[in-house]
Image (cartoon, rainbow, N blue to C red):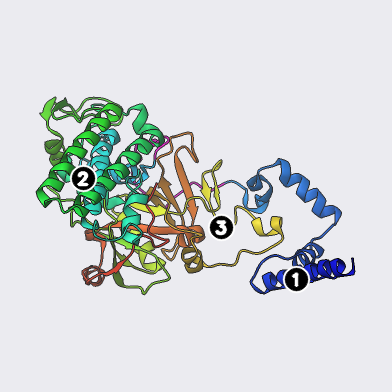
Amino acid sequence: MKTRKLFFVGLILSAGFASAQKTANGGITPVMLTSIQKTQPATAATRALSNAIAVNAIDDLAQNRANAGAINTQFSVETSKQSITDQKSSGRCWMFSGMNVLRSDFAHQHADSLAIEFSQGYTFFWDQLEKANLMLQGVIDTAKEPMESERVRFFFQHPIADGGTFCGLVDLAPKYGLVPAEVVPETFSTENTSKFRALITSKLREYGLELRRMVADKKKADAVAQRKTAMLSDIYRMLTLAYGEPIREFTYAFHDKSGKTRTAPKTYTPQSFYAEIMGGRKLQGSFIMVMNDPRREYHKTYEVEWDRHTYDGTNWCYLNLPMEDIEQLAIAQLKAGRKLYSSYDVGKFLDRKRGYADTENFDYASLMGTTFPMNKADRIATFDSGSTHAMTITAVDLDQNDKPIKWKVENSWGTASGANGYIIMSARWFREYMFRLVVDKDFVSDQLLKESQQKPVMVMPEDPLFQEDF
């Protein structure tokens, strides 16, 4: 019996030693947990707060009443209004924002006597087909790398997506043209993309594995290419079932904002319609893309590898600038009556009911009894913030020194969202949560144009900031 007791004492001591070892290795021990629990307040105020949070939305409780007053909706510089669009349950904000800029430019060229809205469904068909090819060809290009490599994993993890950037429209519109929304309306699946995208994603992963095995089996390059074409034929068929067969010719007459017909009907192809919309201007090369990334050196150009919509298209290439420079570029283009593509971390401090984005909208720190001190660079580096949503800048309010007080953007969430489809942003919120801007070269200084032509530093698509706009 004595021997058995000694044995059990030894087990207990061994368990204690093992627990101590786990403490040294970073695990949560009973001692540590007791220490944590002792620091928790047990006041009546804490209990009341806990009860309130249990049955209310955090934003409702954290709303800063000192910042909840009426919003000044007057802007010293504002572009012409146009109809608000709605991307519904899809991640196509980049396309909506880009097309909103193009149709605004078209109206501007015609002194607002003509109005147009483009078919996002038509362009989305080609976007998805091109992204499917980008994935399959990328798999072929990296077929000799191990399945565990970062780049191979990139293609299989993200075979296809709704999201994107302005460079997608730059590559797609000249190649496939544009179509009026009246000619090719949306389908259920273009407005509600998740289920069909899941099916396409699964098919592409299956096809990707097959192509890798063909390369591993030393099949000839022509045979691999022919098989890829057959796979894309299957993807094309699936796309036509969900999004409709792409139109090849149509008849259309332009109208004004009231809907009154202003031109005689004319027969177009999507490409000839795009050419007429552009009025001889070329989209590619007519603009620069700028970004605010405080982690990296300013006034340098960067390129995001594989951040494109078509295999033979254009990577997202941008000039990194301080916010003060970006603001002046936007102001210059707005003063000329021209809207701009831009993107933001729209989930931060946005009062959706009022359509107002401001860093003082919500006091989460006081509600939770802590602080949130990270700056913009820290938030990006830790995946806490990044570009998530594209919108169209339409107005800015300037003070007597020509400095921005607030901004206004046209969103693509319908007229029931925000301030009748718009979001107003304070200047302080804009500086913290605005990331991307597309500017016509006409409004860019010679110095910045020269900087934008530098040989870019290549950065990886896995970077926290280079997620697609949805």
Displayed quadrant of residue 25: bottom right
Residue 68 position, x and y percent, is 62, 48
For label 3, the residue is: 359
Measure how far apart labels 1 and 3 are at the Cα level: 53 Å
**Disc on the earlier residue, 3 or 2:** 2
Q: Residue at x 83, y 69 (%)?
A: 9
Q: Nearer the viewer, mark 3 or mark 2?
A: 2
- Give the magenta part as a residue range: 71-90
Measure how far apart labels 1 and 2 are at the Cα level: 67 Å
Chief SS of the magenta region? loop
Three-letter code for the amino acid on which mark 3 is drawn: Thr
Q: Quadrant of the N terminus?
A: bottom right
Q: Residue at x 39, y 35 (%)?
A: 86
Three-letter code for the amino acid on which mark 1 is drawn: Ser
Residue 417 position, x and y percent, is 49, 37
Q: Which dot marks residue 468?
A: none
Q: Is residue 188 left or right of residue 42?
A: left
